[in-house]
Image (cartoon, rainbow, N blue to C red):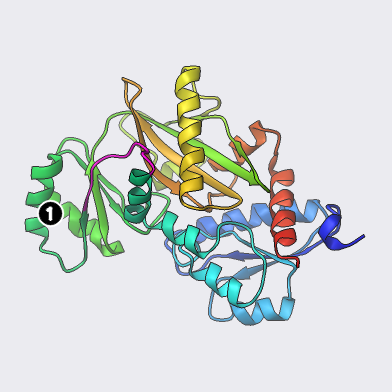
Amino acid sequence: MSKQHDPTLALRVAILAGGSSAEAQVSRNSAAQIEQALVDSGHKTQVIELNDHCVQALLTMQPDVVFPALHGPPGEDGTVQGMLEMLHLPYVGSDVRGSALAMDKAIAKNVFVRQGLPVSEDYIVHPGDDLSAAAEAIQAQLGARVALKPLNQGSAIGVQLLPNGGDIAATLRGSIEYGSCLVEPYIEGREMTVGVLQLQDERLVHPVIEIHTPVGAWYDYEHRYTAGQSEHVLPASISQDLGHRLQAIATSAHHALGLRDLSRADFIVTEEDEIYLLEVNALPGMTPVSLYPEGAAAIGYPFKRLVHTLVTQAFQRGQP
């Protein structure tokens, strides 16, 4: 039986990890989890650090498939995906275009608007802009209570919130260190997330997970990756109608961006059940405290089965 049709055949899987991103250590934590699950499924694995020598390491290994366990640029923004395309190596996750669209929050929001998906107003600030003038324009358009987010970072890196207003120009100086910045109105609400697992032509949607953090805190880097710093309520305590609406939006966003294999959409839901789609992560975290594996387990894909399914599907996609 050929590799293409034998789901039990052991594959050589290269797991890309680390790199220069601010999320490099999270990436390595995801890679360790993925490697253990793949080894438990009988696959041959090698974790390869994303550095100047990774191409040679990939050529030497000649893997059947690559799992980019990467977070932030250049692992999520299409750069690594383009490298793997040039090397003719099948890989888990979205292609170059889908990865690039999802990683740039402003471009992704434009796609969502065209699809009629619910997003907030925004204002974009670029390095080199007059920050005082930008701050005045932001306050006039969005008000004093705003959220500032680097366009091309994940894991809440560089995100700053002004729930009670404040010095927007000074806050911009902190966020702009990570590049262009997306500014949105600060929205009071509950944080929720919905994952999508795409199998061939079928998209399986996860149940809604609500994220609880301590009073006065939000789901920042520390509360995402420190055990016990947040609570994941699965399924979320919401109405069936609201749950279906969130799941439908997550599925539509996955499709609109042209994503592949997996994604996770993040939302704010107000007290009046008004939904705001914040962003879609095309390579969600796979650490022991990550949201995506929890949601996948709830639809019958515990972690070992999940990563085995993803690498097998990616391998088959690369077969002639």
Is residue 223 in view from this perspective?
yes
Q: What secondary structure is the magenta-colored segment mainly? A: loop
Q: Residue visible at 66% across and 35% down? A: 297
Label 1, secondary structure: give it. Answer: helix
Q: Is residue 119 magenta?
A: yes
Q: Which residue is mark 1?
A: 169
Q: Whole-percent x and y of residue 99?
A: 48, 59
Q: Position of residue 186 (x, y in %)?
A: 24, 37
Q: Is residue 105 left or right of residue 306?
A: left
Q: Residue at x 26, y 63 (%)?
A: 177
Tag 1: amino acid: Ala
> Which stretch appears magenta?
115-123
The image quadrant where one finds the C terminus is bottom right
Label count reads 1
Identify the residue at horizontal 86%, vertical 53% (top origin).
Answer: 8
Residue furthest toward the top? 239
Label 1 neighbourhood size at 10 Å, few (<14), some (14-19), many (20+)? Answer: some
The question of residue 125 being in magenta is answered with no
